[in-house]
Each structure stands twice: as C-alpha cells, then as structure tokens.
Image (spheres, rainbow, N blue to C red):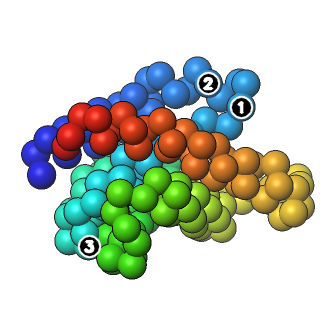
Amino acid sequence: MGTISIIAIAACLLQVTVAVYTRRAFPTFDLPLIVLVFFSFRSGTRRGFALGIVVGIVNAFFTIAPFWLTVFLYAGIGAAVGAVSRWFYRESLFAFIFLVACSGLFLYLVGAFIGPAHPFANIGIADYLGRLILPAALYNALASLFIFYFLKAMRV
C-alpha cells in the first residue's frame, strides 16, 4: 500500500503543477481519479476506500471545494470501483476505461450540484453537461488508455 500511496500523491501533485497548463487547449484530465480507479479496480473495496481517503485528503488541499466533500467523493469512488471490480475481468482495458468515464461523470456531476459555486448561473444545465462535464469525462477515459499501460508496465 505504501508504493501505491506514493504514486497517488505524486499524481495529485502532477495534477496541480503540470496538468494546469493543458487547460487552455482542452479539458484537463483528472490524474488522481484515473490512478485511484486503476488501483481500486485491481485491489478491491478496502484498499480502494483507503486510497480514496489518501487521494481525497491530498486533493482537498488544492481545491476550493469543501474538505469533507472531496474526501468523501474520492473515498466513495474508490470503494465503489473496488466493489464493482469483481464483476469485471481485472486485466480488461475496456472495463477500466468504462469505470474511469463513469467515475469522472459522477465526480463532476456531484461537484456541479454540491460544489462551492453554482455553475448554472449564466448557462443552462444542457450546455454545462455538453460543453464541460461530458468532454471532461471522455477526456479522462481517453487519457486512462495511456495511463493503464504505463501503470501496468510499472508492475505495481
């Protein structure tokens, strides 16, 4: 669990420092979420929950969302992916991409409705879904393709 936690913390720090510069061109991917789903998918419910707490705490320091919301969301996603993983073949790339897309959609939708700022003040919910949430979830799924093979090659 120690190596996995270090990789997850490194993913959070990379998200804050490097991924910020990709926002101008296209929606940025959520690297901590992808790493959390990868390890929860392979490890199960308990480790997914524990890693979700670690990722949530580290990620909460760098967001404007309430601390409890970030920790509970990431812990819940880790536990849910770990619980659902027994229904999928753990080496399946498509199952992993599907779980990353669903987790990203859930995270962004809950963040939109419970988050610190109400996003529907100037645009409608359909525009918000079509222009921000769905492209970000799909971009997470696309980025997870490369991260899946990278983490699998590391043999952690």
Image point (48%, 36%), residue name = 146
Image point (25%, 57%), residue name = 51
Circle 1/circle 2 CB separation < 8 Å: yes
In front: label 2 or label 3 = 3
Mark 1 element type: loop
Image quadrant containing the C terminus: top left
In percent of width and height, residue 3 lies at 14, 41
On the rendered structure, is 66 left or right of 138? left
Amino acid bearing label 1: Phe
Residue annotated with mark 1: 26
Image point (28%, 60%), residue name = 42
Residue annotated with mark 3: 45
Q: Which mark is residue 61?
A: none
Q: In this picture, is 32 found above or below 76?
A: above
Name which of mark 2 and mark 3 comes first in the sequence. Answer: 2
In percent of width and height, residue 13 lies at 35, 31
Mark yes or no: residue 17 visible.
yes
Q: Give the CA distance from mark 1 to mark 3.
A: 33 Å
Amino acid bearing label 2: Thr
Pointer 1 local density, CA inside 10 Å: few below 14, some 14–19, many at least 20 = few
Tell me the quarter of the picture where residue 143 sits.
top right
Q: In this picture, is 129 found above or below 21?
A: below
Circle 2/circle 3 CB separation < 8 Å: no
Q: Which mark is residue 22?
A: 2
